[in-house]
Amino acid sequence: MYAALFLVPWMLMYALSTIVMNHRAAFQERYGGSLVKWATEREQQYTTQFHADADAHAMGQQIMRDLRLNGNFNVNLSRDRKKLTLVRTDPVTPRRITYTPADGKLVVEKQELRTQPFLESLHRRRGFQNSPMPDILWATSVDLVIVAMVIWVLSGLWMWWEMKVTRGFGAICLLTGLGLFTLFLFTI
C-alpha cells in the first residue's frame, strides 16, 4: 500500500507522458503543426574568448555561467563551428541559446509551456551526469520508483503463487502478458 501511495505521482506522470508521446500527431494538429514553440526572450552582443582547446561543452558552460542560467543543458556545435546551440533542459521553462561567434550575437529563446512537450520532457529526463542537486534528486527518485516497481511486481507474483485459488486465472494472465510482450518485441 505504501509503495503504491509513493508511486502515485510517478505512475500518473509516466502514464500521461506515454499517452501524449503515443498520440503526438493529435497534439501537432492541436498546436498547428509544431509541438514546440520558441519565443525570443532577448538578443545581445556577447564577446568572449574561449580557450583554444575548449570543446562545445566547455564553451556552453561558460555561456550558461555568464547568463546565470545554472543547471542541466545540452549543447551542439555545428560542423563548421559557426553556430553553438544550447538547450537549458528545465521542465517548466526550457531555453534555447544560440551563439554565433562570427557576429558575436547571442539569442535567448524561451519555450512556450505546452502539455505535450512538458510531459515528454519529464518522461525523458534522466541521469546522474549533472551536478545540480535537483537533477540528482530527480534521478534518485526515479531509481526509487524503479526499485518500488520491481518489489511491486515480485510481491504480486508471490501473492499469486501463494493464493492457490488464483493460480489458474493468474497463469492465463501471466502467459498472455508474456506472449504479447514477446510479440511486440519481435514485430515492432
Image (cartoon, rainbow, N blue to C red):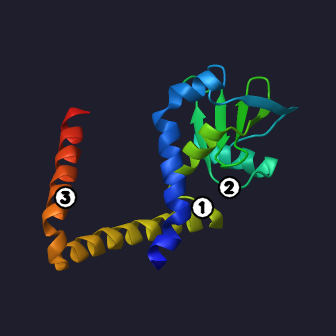
Distance from disc 3 to disc 1, alpha carbons, whole Å, reads 36 Å
Amino acid type of the residue tagged 2 in the rendering:
Gly
Q: Locate residue 104: give its quadrant.
A: top right
Distance from disc 2 to disc 1, alpha carbons, whole Å, reads 8 Å
- Residue found 58% across the figure and 45% down from its top: 119
Q: Secondary structure at mark 1?
A: helix
- Residue found 82% across the figure and 35% down from its top: 46
Please name the residue that numbered disc 1 is placed on: 135
Amino acid type of the residue tagged 1 in the rendering:
Asp
User: Closer to the camera: disc 2 or disc 1?
Assistant: 1
Nearer the observer, 49 or 120: 120
User: Closer to the camera: disc 3 or disc 1?
Assistant: 3
* Left or right relative to 46: residue 157: left
Nearer the observer, 126 or 171: 171
N-terminal of the pair, mark 3 or mark 2, is 2
Q: Position of residue 130 (x, y in %)?
A: 57, 59
Please name the residue that numbered disc 3 is placed on: 174
* Left or right relative to 123: residue 155: left
For the C terminus, the quadrant is: top left
Vertical side of 127 occupied by 21: above or below: above
For the N terminus, the quadrant is: bottom left
